[in-house]
Each structure stands twice: as structure tokens, then as C-alpha cells.
Amino acid sequence: MARKTLIAGNWKMNGRLADGVDLAKGIAAEVKKLGKPSCEFLVCPPFTILSSVKKALRGAKVALGAQDCHFAEKGAHTGDISPLMLTDLGCSYVILGHSERRADHFESNELVNKKAVAAHQAGLKTVICIGETLEQRDAGKTIAVCSDQILGSVPDDSTAADTVIAYEPVWAIGTGKTPTASDVEEVHAAVRKVLAKKLGKGNANKMRILYGGSVKPSNAKEFLSLPDVDGALIGGASLKVEDFMAIAKNSGC
Ligand code: 13P
């Protein structure tokens, strides 16, 4: 089953207006040079510059995503952003359940699930993040934790068309440490099995599972050539045009 590789940048809380626009313009120019890229590109800037980044990406095959949303359509939720507000800004994706939100904002699987339901209803595709802490890994619980997160965070009616999974071991994020390629493949294959049970084999075989955590140009090929790795969710290295594009090129895009 051919799954189109997704090269996604999670800018996190980085990017003031001027540098975010520069970064987006740089990426747009490079992606345009690829002509008809074999991969799909996605950038997820902070809320504050979504609209400006959208303009900077004009004419380039680069999708726009946000890093979170609320589950309600509108209402008394001070400081929150609804899925429909994101579609107004030209977003087609939203990242949900990133480990930084699970940790900093106490987001549970149930909450991530509710947000994903709302995002899908609004026509957004979701990138639902899972991944174990170092403590869980050392206790041999990686697959159990990731399976629980899939079962709890992914809505029951999700499809390969509206959902992407990102496996990001918490201890690999921003640390320069990564699991071995065989560890990554083991988790991705296990996740696909859980998805098959939950959503049916057809969806599971078509659903993209990204790897995230210290992805850089030098290790991209190793991870992205694994049979069950269908792209990357890139943090730090997505903030430099050259690194982001080198990851794409080294992944065969
Ligand atoms: P780094 O690539 O900086 O390790 O971040 C990964 C990540 O959290 C992407 O969502």
C-alpha cells in the first residue's frame, strides 16, 4: 500500500512575524524547485503567524497546520482557538496531543480524542502524537503506552484520509538522542496493528505513521526508509530551510 511521505515541521513556540515569514518563503521557494514533489510538505507555525505564513507559502505545495485546537466550535473558552477558526486561516492540518501539551497542559487521551473529533468535523486533518517517556521505556512499557495512547486518543471513526499518527519518544525530542532504527520499526509496526484492530485493516494500511524526535538530515534516510515509517515530524531542524529541505531530499522527496 503506497503511502505518500509527509515531511512536517512543528515550529513550536518559535517564529516572530519576520523570521516566520522568511522561513516560510524559503521553504516555499525550495519546494517549488522540486516541481512535482513525491512527498507532501506541511508546516505548523504558532497561531500568531498562521495567516502571514499562509500568504508566504502562496503557490507552493506546502500545507499549513496549527499546533493545537479546542474541541468546541465557539464559546466561553478564554485564550482558546476553535478548529473552524483554523480553517478560516487556511489550515488543513492540526497537531494534537503533542507530548509537550500532554505535559505542560495536562492533556489526556480523552481530551485529545475530543479535539480530534472536532477537528475532523471542521474538515481538518489531524496529526495525533504518541510516545513514551524514558521511564516508561526503561520499564519495558513502550508498546503498551503507545497502544493505550492510540486506543484513547484516536477517534473510532478516524480514517487514513483524516488522520496521521506521529510516534515521538519523549526522551528523543530536542535531545539529539534517538531510538535505533529497529526500535522505531518495532513501535511503528505495533502501532499499525493496533490501528488495524481499532479502525480496520484498510485504514491501518493506508494511514501514515510519522517518526519524530531529533530528526536531522544525517539520520532522516535511516528512519524514513523503514517499511512502517511514512514521514517525519520535525522540530528544531524544521526551523532552518536547508535542514528541513535536506531531510526531505534525504528521504527521497
Ligand atoms: P525535535 O526535532 O526538535 O527533536 O522535536 C521533535 C518534535 O517534538 C516534533 O513535534
Image: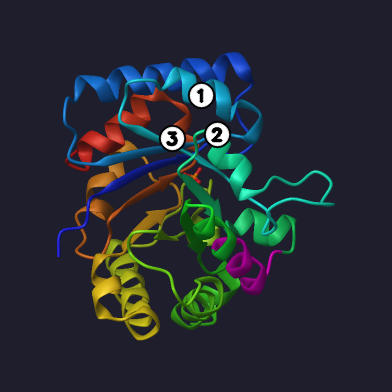
Spatial separation of the CA atoms under disc 3 and disc 2 = 13 Å
Q: Work out whether 141 lies above or below 76.
A: below
Left or right of residue 250: residue 107:
right
Give the vertical position of 156 relative to 209 (above or below): below
Give amino acid for label 1.
Answer: Val
Reading the image, the residue beneath label 1 is 53
Quadrant containing the C terminus is top left
* Residue occupying the point 39% across, 61% down: 179
Q: Is mark 3 within 8 Å of ligand 1?
A: yes
Q: CA distance from mark 2 to mark 1?
A: 8 Å
> Crowding near pointer 3: few (<14 within 10 Å), some, many (20+)?
many
Seen in the image, is 247 located left or right of residue 171? left
Residue at point 25%, 65% (across, down): 206
**Foreground: 62 or 72?**
72
Q: Nearer the viewer, mark 3 or mark 2?
A: 2
Q: From what the image shows, is residue 13 above or below residue 142? A: above
In this view of the protein, which residue sits in the foreground, 178 or 156? 156
- Residues packed near mark 1 inside 10 Å, few (<14), some (14 to 19) or many (20 plus): many
Task: Report the amino acid beneath label 2.
Answer: Pro
Q: Report the span colored magenta.
A: 107-116
User: Which of the 4 image quadrants contains residue 46?
Assistant: top right
Q: 45 or 225: which is nearer to us? A: 45
Name the spot of residue 199 as percent of width and height, x first.
37, 79
* Mark 2–mark 1 CB contact (< 8 Å): yes
> Can you say which quadrant of the picture contains the N terminus?
bottom left
Magenta-span inclusion, residue 109: yes
Q: Amino acid at mark 3?
A: Ala
Report which residue position mark 3 lands on.
237
- Name the spot of residue 252 as percent of width and height, x first: 17, 41
Is disc 2's CB within 8 Å of ligand 1?
A: no
- Lower position in the chain sequence, tag 2 or tag 1: 2
